[in-house]
Amino acid sequence: MNKIDLLYGFLIGLIASLLGSFLFMTFFTDYEFIEGVRILKSQGYLGKLITVGSLLDLAAFGILLKMNKELMARGVVLAVFVLTIATIFTL
């Protein structure tokens, strides 16, 4: 088991979630990214923003499985799991 592939998948998952959240804030709200995150956190919607951002993880997972990169795909699932736990404890 090559742990570096798992780490790469984890990083891909985190970056995809961040990118998804950024794209959502850019295209569907009138706020800048940092300002929007602060506003959504104060309103209690930060978990929903992270959930919407994690939709890109689904695409990354499918692409990695298509390319036969199972360990990287596991890393993406691990990133989603870590984001879920972090969201639960920060809210």
Image (spheres, helix red, strand yellow):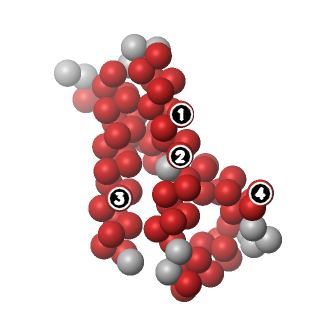
Sort mark 1 into few (<14), some (14-19) or many (20+) by Cα contacts within 10 Å: few
* Residue receiving disc 3: 84
Q: How many angstroms separate mark 2 from mark 3 (CA)?
A: 13 Å
Q: Is residue 9 above or below residue 38?
A: above
Q: How many angstroms separate mark 4 from mark 1 (CA)?
A: 19 Å
Sort mark 3 into few (<14), some (14-19) or many (20+) by Cα contacts within 10 Å: some
Residue 38 x %, y %: 59, 79
Among numbered discs 2 and 3, the one appearing first in the sequence: 2
Residue 16 x %, y %: 54, 44
User: What secondary structure is marked by label 2?
Assistant: helix
Q: Is residue 62 above or below residue 58?
A: above
Near-viewer residue (7 or 30): 30
Q: Quadrant of the C terminus?
A: bottom left
User: What secondary structure is marked by label 3?
Assistant: helix
Amino acid type at circle 4 is Phe
| C-beta proximity under 8 Å, tags 4 and 1 | no
* Residue receiving disc 1: 59
Q: Is residue 6 in sight in this rendering?
A: yes
The answer to which quarter of the image holds residue 29 is: bottom right
Q: How many angstroms separate mark 1 from mark 2 (CA)?
A: 7 Å
Residue 59 x %, y %: 53, 34
Amino acid type at circle 2 is Leu
Q: Is residue 38 in sight in this rendering?
A: no
Amino acid type at circle 1 is Ala
Q: Quadrant of the N terminus?
A: top left
Among numbered discs 2 and 4, the one appearing first in the sequence: 4
- Residue 27's disc is 4
User: What secondary structure is marked by label 1?
Assistant: helix
* Residue receiving disc 2: 55
Q: How many angstroms separate mark 2 from mark 4 (CA)?
A: 15 Å
Q: Is residue 65 above or below residue 77?
A: above
Q: Residue at x 46, y 68 (%)?
A: 47
